[in-house]
Amino acid sequence: MAKTIYTMGVDVGSTASKALILKNGEEIVANAVVDVGAGTTGPKRSITKVLEAANLTMDDINYVTATGYGRNTLEEADFQMSELSCHAKGAYFLFPKVHTIIDIGGQDAKALKIGEGGVLENFVMNDKCAAGTGRFLDVIARVLEVDVSDLDDLDENSTEDVSISSTCTVFAESEVISQLAEGKKIEDIVKGIHSAIAARVSSLAKRVGVKDDVVMTGGVALNEGMVRALERSLNHDIKTSEYCQLNGALGAAIFANQKYQQKLLKEKQASK
Ligand code: ADP
């Protein structure tokens, strides 16, 4: 019987560390998210957590690929791969008809154009400004004294439109504070914030072209209120999965499997 191959993908993000273990390149065995990222103990903790969840040790893992903002600092990695390639790989694995990926992480937002066979054809990125990223939502959630995981329910309970005109995070923060002072409902402010981010991110996405299936990845995709706002703004259905925040780690684990297969093949040829 063929030996089981376990590979690990670790996404050392700006805001969160994600690790995922794949069996034989096709079955997700376990995953872990630690909500601190590059430069912290987060990456190592995500590895410990995912190994525990899979009931495996590092000796059982055949190959590790690191991706994300802090990928070059992960000692455990056999190989590093860019986030863009990993997101394309992960999304294609989950949604083979993907043509557009919108990834909103803690510190940047990206739109990727995917060709047939999951090939990355083009991308645009906003990493210069916090507006339109998870950081913007983190800041606003703090001002509203709610958790980012509450934003979806709050958005759903909005009854009145509130428009947020500031595109800068710092100005939007003061705008939200004055709207609270005017007695505007938190639910309506949250929906207004989602619409403001959606407007920004959809103009990014339109630059690469929006074509079904449109897949949203990154931690912000856990916020369904944000997904609905983007659907309204783009006028397209958006697909997400329970692995949206782990999409980069998933792609990295798939690359790790491919790398390991290549290594086995080379060893076999060398021994002939
Ligand atoms: P990075 O790869 O840059 O570290 P992630 O893709 O992990 O970023 O996304 C982090 C962002 O995801 C955070 O800034 C936060 O706004 C958002 N997020 C994380 N968990 C949740 C949740 N349960 N609900 C809504 N948003 C979330």
Image (cartoon, helix red, strand yellow):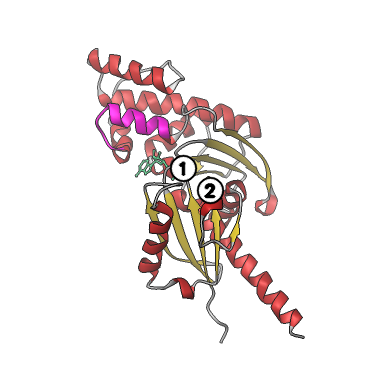
Q: Is residue 241 visible?
A: no
Residue 217, relative to residue 132: is it above or below? below
* Disc on res. 68: 2
Residue drawn at point x = 44 percent, y = 39 percent: 106
* Disc on res. 165: none
| Mark 2–mark 1 distance (CA, rounded to whole Å) | 8 Å
Quick one: SS at disc 2? loop
Residue drawn at point x = 34 percent, y = 28 percent: 140
Q: Nearer the viewer, residue 176 or 237?
A: 176
Q: Earlier in the sequence, mark 2 or mark 1?
A: 1
Task: Please state which amino acid type lies under the numbered disc 2.
Answer: Gly
Q: Ligand 1: does it lie within 8 Å of the C-beta at label 1?
A: yes
Q: Residues within 10 Å of mark 2 (few under 14, many from 20)?
A: many
Magenta-drawn segment:
135-147
Q: Which residue is mark 1?
A: 14
Q: Ligand 1: does it lie within 8 Å of the C-beta at label 2?
A: yes
In the image, residue 136 lies at what x, y percent? 41, 30
In the image, residue 191 lies at what x, y percent? 35, 27
Q: Nearer the viewer, residue 72 or 130?
A: 72
Q: Nearer the viewer, residue 169 or 80?
A: 80
Residue 194, relative to residue 101: is it above or below? above
Q: Is residue 191 magenta?
A: no
Screen quadrant of the C terminus = bottom right
Q: Name which quarter of the figure residue 124 lies in.
A: top right
Residue drawn at point x = 42 percent, y = 40 percent: 220
